[in-house]
Image (spheres, rainbow, N blue to C red):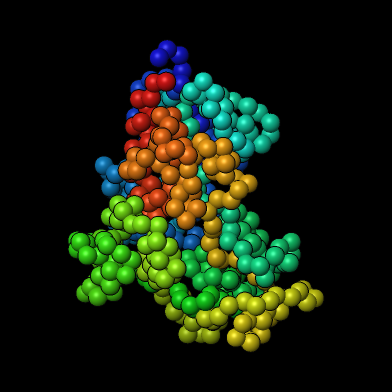
Amino acid sequence: MSGMNRTLIVGGGASGLLVAIHLAKLATRSNLVHLAEPREILGQGLAYSTDDGGHLLNVPAGRMSAFADDSEHFVRWTGRDSNYFAPRKDYGQYLIDTFEELRVASRSTTFEHIRKEVDSLNLKDGKWVARFKDGDVIEYDVVVLAMGHGKPIELASLSEIDSDKNYVSDPWRNLNVTKDGTLIGIGTGLTFIDLALSHLKRNSSNKVIGISRNGLLPEAHLPKRAQPLPVPAAAKTSPTEMRKFIDESSDWRAAQDGVRHELPDIWHSWSVELKQEFFTNHLRWWNVHRHRVSPEIQEEVSQALNSGRLTILACEIESIEKNEGSFNLKTKSGERLIADALVNCLGYSAWGKDSLLGQLIDSGLAKAAPLSLGICSDFPKFNVVDENEKPHRNLFAIGPVLLGERFETTAIPELKEQAQEVAKEVSKFVL
């Protein structure tokens, strides 16, 4: 093909920038790459947008390289050892530095960060026509969907306070809690841990209450990671058998790490009923064990719990009322709590009807994934399939948009491998 290919990467967070990094490394033909990302800075997304140095990665440096064939790349960048848990803001800078180095060195590929949001994608004569929310329309030879996470999960009880200045519904896109006093977090996962510790550090009189149905906090990494255990065949047959293998292993961390490496294949082999069983009965257990905090963060959490400044409650919210600058919460068990500020730490849902993925599904250009968690590709490849399960040659997906198909598809160890595979296909693409 003569001339220059036009490629659109939808999303400029970690997923999108990793694709750009590998494109810059692999591309040999002329290529113009647009990274459509409304944020001013690439590579941050939800995960690395924090500017708090106390918010640490939950994966050690030895597993955070941008390159599968150079596992020590990030370790060298940090100047620390492979067991170091770096600040998340530093990892965002690492991605930018890596991209800039390869972008400058690339002779065939031109990259442009366009601060626009894609509203729709449609096929025309084999090419993709992107309409942006500002009204611009641009045609592309290849498109990569790397939008990251969807919108925050919301409780019905939170809807009436959504506009209150002391309530944060989307903490990693709009974190503006500065009010001292008692902060209540709805949800007690990794996001809660980060925000709770920041609030406690800001003022020695501040307190935090975490509320979740099970009252469980994330488990912690050991100072040194053990080698993953091999997964027996029985553990691959159902969520119950998988959990049994992990719970009964002499080292549950090593057992779960072994499962994690094979989980996309295991998940893809399960029926919709088994996937639903996992979500209904085992998801919270999985998340608590899988998404671990660093040993340093675990120590801070323990100190906060022991001092009484951090309290965790296993309950559900029944109602929330505003009362002269504070919030009155009533739980379904009858407890009443007062908060000066509230933050939604429930995480992020799949992509709704009003999203780009919703438009692609509604138009038949994509197929909804199991449990409506994103879209389908031609597994194990990353070409998006249409409603008839026919793969598009020039439409790819990476990361959380493939949650329903792969489940384990949100962390850097998986994303860098996906990015490399997608970049290989894009770099050799001829329409």
Residue plotted at (40% across, 50% down): 405
275 vs 238, left or right, is right
Q: Is residue 205 above or below residue 419?
A: below
Question: Which residue shows up at 56% across the image and 76% down it?
Answer: 211
**Residue 194 showing in the rendered view:** no
Vertically, is 283 above or below 211? above
> Which residue is at the far top?
2
Nearer to us in this view, 296 or 110 = 110
In the image, what residue occupies the spot 51% across and 85% down?
307
Q: Residue furthest right?
A: 324
Q: Quadrant of the N terminus?
A: top left
Q: Position of residue 14 (x, y in %)?
A: 46, 46
Compared across the picture, whether 153 is left or right of 89 comes to right
Q: Position of residue 371 (x, y in %)?
A: 47, 56
Instruction: Judge left or right: residue 131 versus residue 369.
Output: right
Given residues 409 and 323, the one toward you in this image is: 409
Instruction: Kindly indicate the quadrant of the structure image that contains residue 80.
Output: bottom left
Decide if residue 370 is in sight here: yes
Name the outermost residue toward the bottom: 334
Say how many tags the image has. Answer: 0
User: What percent of the width, then of the height, locates residue 337?
Assistant: 66, 82
The quarter of the picture where the C terminus appears is top left
Query: Residue drawn 52% across and 37% down?
Result: 364
Above or below for 3 versus 188: above
Q: Residue 32's x, y, as percent?
A: 48, 24
